[in-house]
Image (tube, coloured by chain):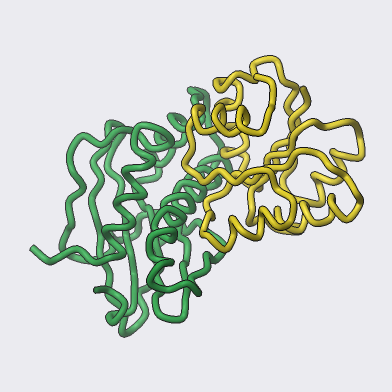
Amino acid sequence: MRQMTQWSSALLDGVRALEGGILPPLVEQPVLTEGGIPANLPGAWVGLVGEYRSLQLGLVAEFVTLELVTANMLGTSGNLTDIEITDAITEVVNVIGGVAKRQIIEIDPSLRSGPPMFLFGRLRMPTGMMSEAFRLRTELGELHLVSISASGDAS
Amino acid sequence: MRVLVVDDSRAMRMIVVRQLRQAGLEDADFIEAQHGLEALDRLSEGHVDLVLSDWNMPEMNGLELLRELRARDEQVLFGFVTSEGTPDMVRLARESGASFLISKPFTPNNFRDTLDAIGVQL
């Protein structure tokens, strides 16, 4: 198994900080999966960019799972609009990114968050970048936490 | 007590209000705004005791909102609730007149302890 990068470790701390709160409880430990970014799953992305470190962070899943996660987060059971779901999931990824940023900023004080976005398709991976994906099996379904960073930023 | 919650995420505004109620502000009157400019409109419509604001927002961010309020000599209690929270941002918030900065994710206990520390009656 590959060794976790600093980013992955910081991001998983972010997940743990949200687990049982705005994220549903995990039913198993996060699993680092092979095969890169899960294909064509919708989800929210946020960029963290600094002089020495940068990262695109995504939380992607089947849309029905994102809907269940949103309902759980908002404490609602009624029908949710796409806007409510994309808003909530974007906020989740923003908070995970924020937790990670507070750790990595010791290494790169220039690190800044970009505006988060929601994509209904796959984010194309730029050349020269590496990706990691963790499967997060929750009580409400499977989520994937994906990070894309420059190869030299990983360790 | 009248509390203004400012965040561009509706989901986060709902969560902040819910957790503030759980923290002891059950009877507070909550009003909401999506960004700093809208917050200024809400503030012009009536007295507000406490402003809880996100940092990164479109139109006018939380720091700009706080600075605008202080430039108008508006001394309403102001705190940030944000996914930011780096040492630089905490310093900027304090220097600009914020009473506190709570990093997301938060719990009702975070709110209770912080509001208690600044003398808000729960």
Tell how many labels: 0
Residue occupying image coordinates x 51% and y 27%: B108
Check the picture and name the quadrant holding the N terminus of chain A: bottom left
Question: Where is residue A40 shown, x and y percent of the image?
Answer: 34, 59
Q: Is residue B2 above or below residue A130?
A: above
Residue occupying image coordinates x 60% and y 44%: B81
Residue occupying image coordinates x 75% and y 41%: B33
Q: Is residue A35 above or below residue B34?
A: below
Check the picture and name the quadrant holding the C terminus of chain A: bottom left
Q: Judge left or right: residue A140 versus residue A49.
A: left
- Residue A65, quarter of picture: top left
Which residue of the protein is positioned furthest toward the top in this rendering?
B27
Q: Judge left or right: residue A43 versus residue A15.
A: right
In the foreground, A31 or A112: A112
The shade of chain A is: green
Which residue of the protein is positioned furthest toward the left in this rendering?
A1
Residue occupying image coordinates x 49% and y 37%: B106
In the foreground, A78 or A51: A51
| Chain shaded yellow | B
Question: Where is residue A90 shown, x and y percent of the image?
Answer: 50, 50
Q: Judge left or right: residue A117 versus residue B97.
A: left
Q: Judge left or right: residue B104 versus residue A52.
A: right
Q: Is residue A99 above or below residue B20?
A: below
Which residue of the protein is positioned furthest toward the bottom in this rendering?
A128
Q: Is residue A18 above or below residue A7?
A: above
- Residue B3, quarter of picture: top right
Question: Where is residue A31 shown, x and y percent of the image?
Answer: 17, 51
Question: Where is residue B50 shown, x and y percent of the image?
Answer: 75, 34
